Amino acid sequence: MSDVSSPEAKPIRQLDHVVIRFAGDSGDGMQLTGDRFTSETAQLGNDLSTLPNFPAEIRAPAGTLPGVSSFQLHFADHDILTPGDAPDVLVAMNPAALKANVGDLPGGATVIVNVDEFNKRAMAKVGYATSPFEDDSLSGFTVHQVPLTSMTVESLAEYEVPKRDAVRAKNMFALGLISWLYSRPVESTIAFIERKFAARPEIATANVAAIKAGWAYGETTEGFAVRYEVKPATLPAGNYRNITGNTALAYGIVAAGVRSELPVFLGAYPITPASDILHELSRHKKFGVTTFQAEDEIAAVGAAIGASYGGALGVTSTSGPGVALKSEAISLAVALELPLVVVDVQRAGPSTGLPTKTEQADLNIALFGRHGEAPVAVVAASSPSDCFHAALEACRIAVQYRTPVILLSDGYLANGSEPWKLPEIDELPDLRVAFADGPNHTLDNGEEVFWPYKRDPQTLARPWAVPGTAGLEHRIGGLEKRDGTGDISYDPANHDLMVRTRAARIEAIEVPDLEVEDPTGDARVLALGWGSTYGPIGAACRKLRAAGQSIAQAHLRHLSPMPANLGKVLASYDKVIVPEMNLGQLSTVLRARFLVDVIGYQQVRGLPFTSTELESVFEEVVKNV
Amino acid sequence: MSETVAARTAFDLIPKATGPQAAKDFKSDQEVRWCPGCGDYAILAAMQGFLPELGLARENICFVSGIGCSSRFPYYLNTYGMHSIHGRAPAIATGLAASRPDLSVWVVTGDGDALSIGGNHLIHALRRNVNLKILLFNNRIYGLTKGQYSPTSEVGKLTKSTPMGSVDYPFNPLSLAIGAEASFVARTIDSDRKHLTSVLRAAAEHEGSAFVEIYQNCNIFNDGAFDVLKDPESRDEALIRLEHGSPITLGKDGQWAVVRTGWGLGVAETASVDPADIVVHDETVEDASYAFALSRLPGLDLRNTPIGVLRNVKRPTYDSIVREQLETAATSAPKEEELARLLNSGDTWTIL
Ligand code: SF4
């Protein structure tokens, strides 16, 4: 901040990590504030992880508890795995934000409140009979009562902005203050604001002024005696950017198109929290990505199947309710043996459930949710940036094995973010496959013919023969097909063979062995997870190890087929603990398949696990082996 | 943009056959399994006879169907084909047609498939004007599931599921298609091969979604449903044969004529009207009200049923606009390079 004069430098204290939560009304711009602070932090080289949490309503009633939107950010000078269990600092823009979040604060936390909003009516609305600053409800915390609204308005007095816009800039004032407090550079935010409001320069000016005023306030007020610094983390060398799961997933699909040299066709119907994948992919037409906003979920998957039949990489993105609707069409793709990627960004169900909250309760529908014996491949992403690689892997399996693949992400991964070490393009997997271009079978009479269901002996995949290829004209469909020729067949033995073959070809998919992390090498307990629980499980294991205990961790990327060594891994530990944000869906599968008495631990609160919670669960298990 | 679209024909981007084709080239080796006497046979024969006329490379023709008797159609044609799931053929074909401009894509569907379970896909395919030819075989009954009433069955239909008569009011498929912004709407009859072929040709030549209702006799579960339109005794009084540019009349000697009445069109005795008041058919009328009014002429008894092309207007197709956007966005840079640029976009930083 060169143009903000520094009256007198305040002492700087070093921290190794900080968890900040910005909370306010859904109209207060907390997500933007959090995003900007994240970006500043990322550029500083900290490792970080974020957790946005917002209501399903676009503008929930102002000042109410259900209307509170928050953004939590954990940043550190070392490699971290989660957005943090509990905030060290809470920025509360109104009484509702304080009330909704104060219960999550550990003793000694810092609370920065916008005291201007703590009038009688606003406090009464959320059930504060007396002001929380006057009773002892905040006694365990360091409370900064900052008149954010009035100072913002005051600092913008000299600009020609309507009062309403001045008031709205209070989140930028708060951002300036917090950026000062944690020594974050705000230049990129200023550039961002100028870009965002290029068409309305007066608003840009006001917001930039608010940021600077917030920064200056930190420097001058006596309320904040020290500043903090969190040194950059020593992450592996490379180029980094911060990325959310949905963006990473969309990029993964673009990359799969490039690496397979296939046009990508996305069929999608808007649904929370998956819509951003549609939005993102619709911006990448230059890669030959077609996005089709369909009339419904069924048309979305249907069109993707049609495109795949025509030789494109057919993808459909949705959440649980959409997967349910697509189920019949996915079964068709199983019968047709065509590539199809179904992205399920899971949210809390059943039915509409909690559309903006996370859950991993769609494992069952992914594995089993179809009529008939209709096995598909299932792949799960484990962190926001991992969504990129998981998407590439899903596409690899789909095109190489000509099968539907369900790619599981969830609301936490979708909207959460973390630094991502950018991959080199030529190190990404080569996904090129060849279309069929001629006869593949010789009849007894010597005639060369094309058999649409004659399989590759290795992959068991049938040829991908796209319309437009002369001599390969053939008909496919949902009716049972004769092995090889693909003709309609009602023969019992053939049906039995085809059902078994469809199962066998999923099992034939080559997936890497499960890797186990056990630094001490003597663990007797294995913590096994899948999907977005990777961070909290990993963080809990680290804590336990730091306390001198041994525990092994493994995480499943492939849920179908499962890694070949999984049974052996499970059998080599005395106890296996499986935390899941459902009622034990993976546990049930493991018990059924491997006859292993796994211990399940479940929580379905619409929020990720905290590492503290898992640490105590794991500790219990480790103690009792 | 609209100029290039208008200048285009439906076949511009589709490779042509290199040699002469015959009907037998379009017969697949599969045994046809409809009930003997089913109207589907006639439609299949007409199609196999007509496809060689198009002169398109056989491998660039694709039939997509849903579920129902009619949906077995693709199996019997030696082109590419997909027999998909109930009601979803227009959606699947949309994905195929939108990504493959070099294909002539046909959807074969029935009254239950297109208007009941697949109603949503049908109307959206039509409004988008995807380059698809949708053939709806209307037999006014569920054949494959053995005889329940369908969304085009007349009220009071006695079927296995409606022993006291069906209660719900039927769709008029052409009215529905026109309401759904279809740019091409036609009707024909299974038994009139010549007419059927002429309508198929017009549909094939139309760039965009073409909707063709084909009255098809299910001789097992709804035999004679269209007899009034086929019987030499009654057909001339019941059928209106639309000819682009000709006054619309019916009756053996044209003793009836279509004239404007009230909000729409009606039938009057030719002798009683001024010849100048007889409507001259123009399938290219932009205002959909005209085609809609034609579609409303018949009552539930099928008298005054227009056949032929009711509506045939030009509108940019969904797939051509999608393609244009892709072409506009395309760059000459290698895709790998573009990908590296994409991943490195936004705020990045380097750790040494
Ligand atoms: S049931 Fe009817 S429509 Fe179906 S094949 Fe038999 S006659 Fe044709």
Image: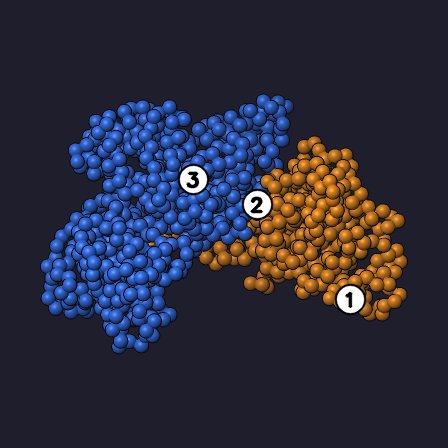
Picture layout, residue B39 above or below residue A216: above
The residue located at (24%, 70%) in the rendering is A151
Dot 2 lies on which element? helix
- Of all chains, the one bearing label 3 is A
Q: Are marks 2 and 3 on the same chain?
A: no
Q: Which chain is orange?
A: B
Picture layout, residue A32 above or below residue A607: below
| Nearer-N-terminus badge (1/2) | 2
Say which mark, if any, is on residue B261.
1
* Label 1 – label 2 distance at C-alpha: 41 Å
Please say if the residues under marks 1 and 3 sit with CB atoms less than 8 Å apart.
no
Question: Colour scheme of this structure image?
Answer: by chain
* Label 1 – label 3 distance at C-alpha: 59 Å
Q: Are marks 1 and 2 on the same chain?
A: yes
- Left/right placement of residue B189 relative to residue A379 reads right
Q: Is residue A293 visible?
A: yes
Say which mark, if any, is on residue B92.
2
- Of all chains, the one bearing label 1 is B
Dot 3 lies on which element? loop
The three-letter amino acid code for the residue at tag 3 is Asp
